[in-house]
Image: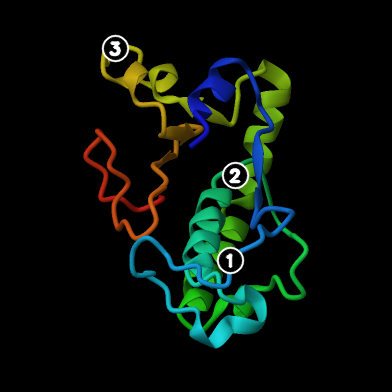
Amino acid sequence: MFDVTHVGAAGGTNWDTDIAGFFSPAIPADYRAEHKPLIDGSDARDTIANYEDYPELFVRWFEWGAFQPVMRAHGERNHNEVWSYGKRAEPILAKYLKLRYQILPYTYSIAYGSYKTGAPYMRALFMDFPGDPKAADIPAEYMYVAAFLVAPVTEQGATQSGSDTGSDGATS
């Protein structure tokens, strides 16, 4: 996973990710996920074809995207709506889409603060916890300003982030 702490520490105030990736990889006909997918995509074959763990990956990206300055989901698939990744993925995606809209006023206010001060939206933990010597050694977590500790789950089939902060593994 990209070390997001470097972006914030370097002053990158407008980091985002391309949720879903722009180009879909060529998936071999005999592809099987390393672990049993946590989200059944069997009702979304028109969108995912034989990429059986793609709904799980899309959900992870989407959850992470909710806590970035710019959230965008697009790509070359025919369908990319929250309902196009299956009945198990849809309520999770809808939850994070609603959360994104709920925190949008907050995101706008931190955008203004970033404009005025140069402080990044996404901050390495050591920026908010300078007295904690462990904070500098946690590269895969960040603060979405002071309100949200973001600890993305990055392993397929995992249910926790594997963080050192004691997080329950949720993205929020």
| 149 and 76: which is toward the camera | 76
Residue at the far left: name it.
166
Disc 1 marks a residue whose amino acid type is Pro
When the figure is inspected, residue 83 is found, relative to residue 26, above or below; the finding is below
Label 1 crowd (10 A; few <14 / some 14-19 / many >=20): few
Q: Where does residue 56 sit, x and y in percent of width and height? A: 47, 65
Q: Judging from the image, what secondary structure is the residue with disc 1 in?
A: loop
Disc 3 marks a residue whose amino acid type is Gly
- Left or right: residue 107 versus residue 64 is right
Give the residue at x 62% y 59%: 101
- Left or right: residue 138 versus residue 4 is left
Disc 2 marks a residue whose amino acid type is Tyr
**Which residue is tagged 2?**
106
Q: Where does residue 1 sit, x and y in percent of width and height? A: 48, 37
Nearer the observer, disc 2 or disc 1?
Answer: 1
The answer to whether any part of residue 33 appears in the image is yes
Residue 10, located in which quarter of the rendered image? Answer: top right
Q: Between marks 2 and 3, how big is the CA–CA gap? A: 26 Å
Give the residue at x 59% y 44%: 106
